[in-house]
Image (cartoon, helix red, strand yellow):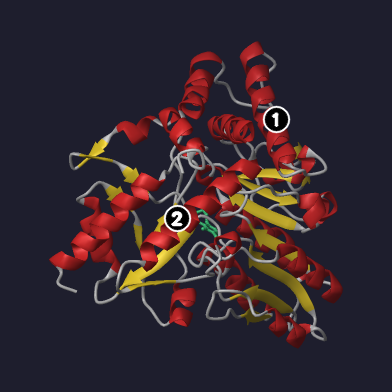
């Protein structure tokens, strides 16, 4: 077993926060789906940026401004290589995945969606990949439709047939669910979208950090993800978009940086991707994200994925042994990303999370920004544990022990 979990034991040293105590106990961080912890290399890359070459980008002709610009654009190249985009021109830096999806909604949707068009999504979306489409459907009088999921949390693909003869303009789906853990059959979904002539928006917030993603192979039109969920800092996210689509899109924020020429009454937009990056960008964020990508790639995305499958398998095995635990999503760890949402009979998930904190264990409770999904499951809330490369099985043992203690305490 030690060998299987060697990666986690090896990398833990790189994460200073894992050395701290919470309520006198070592921190057990099981909330990486919300945000991940940062390795020292990322923290140092940001410190180094501020100590050595902090300057605004794209403007200065002096040395440190050129260094800062180079670092910012190198980060874009790294992101492009990570997901195998054709060119860094297809990578737009945003604040987070949410902003990236909103950018597609305003920039592409406003121009291309008409009254009566179908906007297709699923019943397992995070609010960030639902509310933009609700807004667009209201703005344009479009018809928002949903693909459901079955008892195991797998998409009901047969429901796609209902839309074969409809004017589906857009299909927005999550690659990995932040509640069910389900990894959706993205290739099949993109193929379907092409058949009906829809563009695809892939929410990869829970996917890019955890597995090898190749946007050319997948052939999706847009993909969104966040730096802070992949060891990078908060405040930096990514929109991948096919060059042709980005060229045709309108910016949804205007101002400095994103223009070539400005007159009093009209302006000429900058080239992509800068056309979408109005104002001073988050250079610190890009520098930190680049360091995070280097760190992950040194481990290898395939190794990350394999490790998380093992941890998930271990966690599911532990959880099912606890009487009263109901977990959601697929049974097979191979069909899941590294998280498990569950409920403990007779105990509210907020009580579980609060009591676990007394043992230094950090988990998430609530609706995880997916209220309609919880409605579908017939519940109001769930407890969620989520992993990353720095988690180890002994932490899951501590969680299981603590859950048993809570059950005794609350007499269930
Ligand atoms: C599946 C999914 N999509 C989108 C988001 C939104 O990410 P952010 O808050 O970084 O924009 C999250 C965050 O938890 C998520 O899990």
Q: Which element carries disc 1, helix, strand or loop?
A: helix
Q: Mark 2 sits on what residue?
A: 314
Q: Is residue 225 left or right of residue 38?
A: right
How many badges with numbers are in the image?
2
Binning the other alpha carbons within 10 Å of mark 1 as few (below 14), some (14 to 19) or many (20 upward) gives some
Q: Position of residue 15 (x, y in %)?
A: 42, 32
Q: Is residue 197 left or right of residue 300?
A: right
Q: Position of residue 165 (x, y in %)?
A: 83, 86
Q: Mark 1 sits on what residue?
A: 73
Binning the other alpha carbons within 10 Å of mark 2 as few (below 14), some (14 to 19) or many (20 upward) gives some
Q: Position of residue 393 (x, y in %)?
A: 40, 47
Residue 258 in view of the camera: no
**In the displayed structure, would residue 392 be above or below residue 405?**
above
Residue drawn where x is 38% and y is 79% of the image = 379
Residue 377 in view of the camera: yes
**In the displayed structure, would residue 60 be above or below residue 405?**
above
Frontmost residue, 239 versus 376: 376
Residue drawn where x is 24% and y is 36% of the image = 21
Residue drawn where x is 70% and y is 78% of the image = 157
């Amino acid at each position: 077993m030690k060998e299987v979990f060697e990666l986690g034991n090896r990398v833990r040293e790189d994460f200073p926060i894992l050395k701290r105590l919470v309520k006198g106990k070592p921190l057990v961080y099981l909330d990486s789906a919300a945000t991940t912890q940062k390795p020292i290399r990322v923290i140092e890359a940001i410190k180094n940026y501020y100590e050595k070459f902090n300057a605004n980008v794209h403007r200065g002709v002096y040395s440190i401004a050129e260094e800062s610009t180079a670092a910012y654009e190198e980060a874009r190249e790294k992101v492009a290589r990570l997901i195998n985009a054709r060119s860094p021109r297809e990578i737009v830096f945003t604040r987070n995945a949410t902003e990236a999806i909103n950018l597609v909604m305003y920039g592409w949707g406003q121009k291309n969606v008409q009254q009566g068009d179908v906007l297709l999504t699923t019943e397992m979306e995070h609010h960030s990949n639902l509310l933009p489409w609700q807004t667009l459907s209201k703005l344009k009088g479009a018809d928002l439709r949903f693909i459901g999921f079955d008892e195991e949390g797998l998409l009901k693909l047969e429901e796609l047939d209902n839309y074969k003869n409809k004017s589906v303009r857009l299909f927005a789906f999550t690659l990995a669910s932040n509640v069910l853990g389900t990894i959706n059959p993205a290739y099949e979904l993109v193929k379907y979208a092409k058949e009906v002539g829809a563009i695809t928006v892939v929410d990869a917030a829970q996917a890019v950090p955890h597995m090898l993603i190749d946007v050319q192979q997948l052939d999706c039109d847009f993909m969104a993800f966040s730096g802070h969920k992949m060891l990078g800092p908060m405040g930096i996210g990514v929109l991948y978009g096919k060059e042709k689509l980005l060229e045709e899109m309108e910016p949804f924020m205007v101002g400095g940086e994103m223009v070539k020429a400005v007159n009093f009454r009209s302006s000429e937009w900058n080239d992509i991707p800068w056309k979408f990056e109005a104002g001073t960008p988050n250079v610190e964020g890009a520098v930190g994200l680049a360091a995070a990508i280097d760190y992950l790639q040194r481990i290898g995305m395939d190794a990350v994925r394999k490790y998380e499958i093992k941890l998930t398998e271990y966690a599911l095995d532990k959880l099912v042994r606890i009487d009263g635990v109901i977990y959601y999503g697929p049974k097979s760890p191979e069909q899941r990303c590294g998280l498990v949402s569950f409920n403990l009979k007779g105990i509210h998930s907020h009580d579980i999370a609060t009591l676990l904190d007394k043992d230094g264990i950090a988990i998430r409770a609530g609706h995880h920004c997916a209220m309609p999904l919880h409605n579908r499951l017939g519940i109001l809330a769930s407890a969620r544990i989520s992993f990353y490369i720095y988690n180890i099985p002994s932490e899951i043992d501590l969680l299981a022990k603590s859950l048993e203690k809570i059950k005794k305490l609350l007499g269930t």
